[in-house]
Amino acid sequence: MTRENQDALVVEGVSVNIGERTIIHNCSFKVGQGEFVGIIGPNGAGKSTLLKSLRGMLPLAFGQVSVFGHPIHRLGDKNAARLVAYMQQDVNVGFGFTALEVVLAGRYPYLEWWQNETAHDHHIAKEYMAFTGVEALADKPVNHVSGGERQRILLAKVLAQETPLIFLDEPTASLDLVYQEEIFRYCQAICKEGKSVLIIAHDIKLAAKFCSRLILMVEGQIVADGVPRDVITADNLEKAYGLHSAVFLNKVTGNLDIHTYEACATAGKRRSIHIIGGGGSTGDMMRSLYERGYRLTAGVLQAGDTDADVATAFGIDVVTGQAFSEITDRQAQDNRHKIACADLVLLGNLCYGKQNLDNLQAAFSASQLIVIEDTPIDERDFTGGEAVKLYRELVQRQQVTVMSSAQFLTKIEHYEGEKDASIYS
Amino acid sequence: MECRRKSKGLVFAILGGLLAGIILMSLGSGQVKVPLIQTLTVIGTQLGITGLPGAALTPEQTAVVWHIRLPRTLVGLLVGAALGVSGAVMQGVFGNPLADPGIIGVSAGASLGAVIAIALGLTASGLYYMPLCALIGALLAVGLTVALAMKDGKIPVMTLLLAGVAVSMLLGAITSGILTFMNEYRLREFLFWMVGGLDFRRWEHVFLAAGPVTVGIIILCLLARHLNILVLGEQEARSVGVPVFVFRLLLLFVSAVTTAAAVCVSGSIGFVGLVVPHIMRLLIGPEHRVLLPACALAGGLFLVGCDTLGRLLIPPAEIRVGIMTALTGAPYFLYLLRRAQKGGGLS
């Protein structure tokens, strides 16, 4: 059996019925060797059913599942068990079987019915127990160890099966965060050896962090399939979980991160506000306003600025300028156009330098303007007095209200819920 | 691991020693006391072993040891071993420490077979009729239970349990129905069957049970590794490639036949299949390759021990072994239950 360059798993048009109900609808995908695939989706999406039927434990209504080119339902019991290992969600290890005895069960497919485990099998079992760090528990009854230890013992059992394809059904359920990460890390290491792992995960962030690919399931169908950053999008999360969210790359951790918020009835129906920010001065306001259903635009924000990241995460229409360079005419024009379109303009508590002085000038074109002032303008001026002059002139104008960011945030809280509430009345 | 293996060896050594002791005691004690030397001489002479230190034997001693006590003890060993091993296997198959062969209808079927044999008067015409009827009844009952529970080539454990209960109730009703039409003499005969005993067992009984029981126990011990994995649950077993259906069916039938073969010569005897595997599991762990042989030894030990005790307690009368096993087994079992409750779980 040559396994070179062969797909580990090919799923073609699989549908599964349980009783009268169709649980899995027409699922197709391929898994290559060395892939670490996370299956995510809300409860009842059919993830476990899918995994079970891929392992050949449930009859398929339609379609075919092939493991290294062999249809799984036609492989013999033992042959299938030499190609695919499967770890189910709740294993009830009764009668006080010890960890070693449970791990040795993984060697079953390699033994004739009359054979006992050989020294070689014991060696393999011990090796994988060492890998998952449970060798010291070998003689302990599995029902007397902690949840994390138990899952690591069961993982060692699945690994002792030495299959090129491994299915794990929520191995991290009910584990502490540390243990959850550990299980994912073990899987990642296994995949580096060229084995393929399919894991059902309920923690999307963890799955996105470790898996090389994600499959999102909703109501028995695959809605998205690809690298984590393509699958975990605000759109998909709303489709799958009914979740309002902003997905962004967390710059501290380097991982995809998800910010979720409660949906509001007025989403996108409130007045439009243009935000002039930068240097992280308006991130909080952008979030509060966005979550309360205001239509937002922003500009000119420098690329890489925290404010720019927040705007991108929420999908806000933003004019972005190059970092450490002056605002171009094109950007200035864009910015003024957005200001003209907005019902209200918000000028953040930003510092001014040569590069962004145009932001201050643009504010003059606003018909309604709120100026946020947390620190006196003298401390924020790096233009040698030019910004101070412009700023003083600006706040004199009739259409301008000045307040602190705290006042502003309280104000939006306060108007929350009122019909057609306006924050500048 | 090393330490555990040693302790397992120790358990077997102790079991073997106790077994030898209790066998000799059961052969020697009773209304006619036979000293140890004479007992051994009788067995030696009967087996045709020459060159023994010839102790003087009375014909009475020979008759008592060889024709009355030895068959009785051997039947006790066979029945005890069969019940112990089948109990452990059933508990494994059902994944429930309270299961025993009775749970899939073995006892109810055997009782019905026995009561039919008695009602038809077959017991008078030959020694083999009642055991055979009991055996057939037991197997039919198990067959019916399994057939009722089977669906799409699977035997779900829960359905099997319920089917077992239903079949037992049905057969029990028929048994009671037949009993109401029987005369007093036959009722008494049935009562003796219901309360299992080892008295008046002859070599014919030994020969009848020996074949199926030993073969059954050997097969079950050979399947022990597969049983280990079945115990982890159906899905676990299937995921490592165990043909669950085949093994479940095989284990059920072999242990049912073994139990039926035993019960048909002794009458129904409770608690051995429940208590013995439980204690053995506590002593040497759940690994069936070790557990099943240990249950065979311990089952024989427990039954012969109970029988001997029953003969010695209130001479010249005898307490039947079925009563003794329940009298000693039930309190001990309750004690185990209490302890397990405090420990927070059964298995």
Image: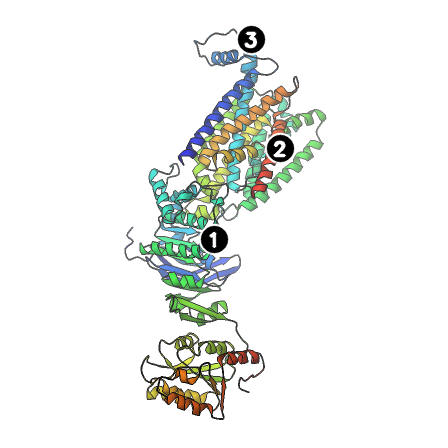
Does label 2 lie on the same chain as label 1?
Answer: no
The image shows residue A121 at horizontal and vertical percentages of 35, 41
Circle 1 Cα neighbour tier, 10 Å, few/some/many (<14 / 14–19 / ≥20): some
**Quadrant into which the N terminus of chain B falls:** top left
Checking the image for residue A342, the label placed there is none
Circle 2 Cα neighbour tier, 10 Å, few/some/many (<14 / 14–19 / ≥20): few
Q: Report the side of B162 relative to A257 (left or right).
A: right
**Tag in front: 2 or 3:** 2
Residue name at image x 48 percent, y 82 percent: A295
The image shows residue B89 at horizontal and vertical percentages of 50, 37
CA–CA distance in space, label 3 to label 1: 69 Å
Residue A89, compared with residue A142, is above or below; it is below
Q: Amino acid at mark 1?
A: Gln
Q: Nearer the viewer, residue A261 or A362?
A: A362
Mark 3 and 1 residues: CB-CB less than 8 Å, in contact?
no
Q: Which residue is mark 2?
A: B331
* Badge 3 element: helix
Q: Label 3 is found on which chain of the structure?
A: B
Q: Which residue is mark 3?
A: B59
Q: Which residue is mark 1?
A: A89
Q: Report the side of A324 relative to A407 (left or right).
A: left
CA–CA distance in space, label 2 to label 3: 42 Å
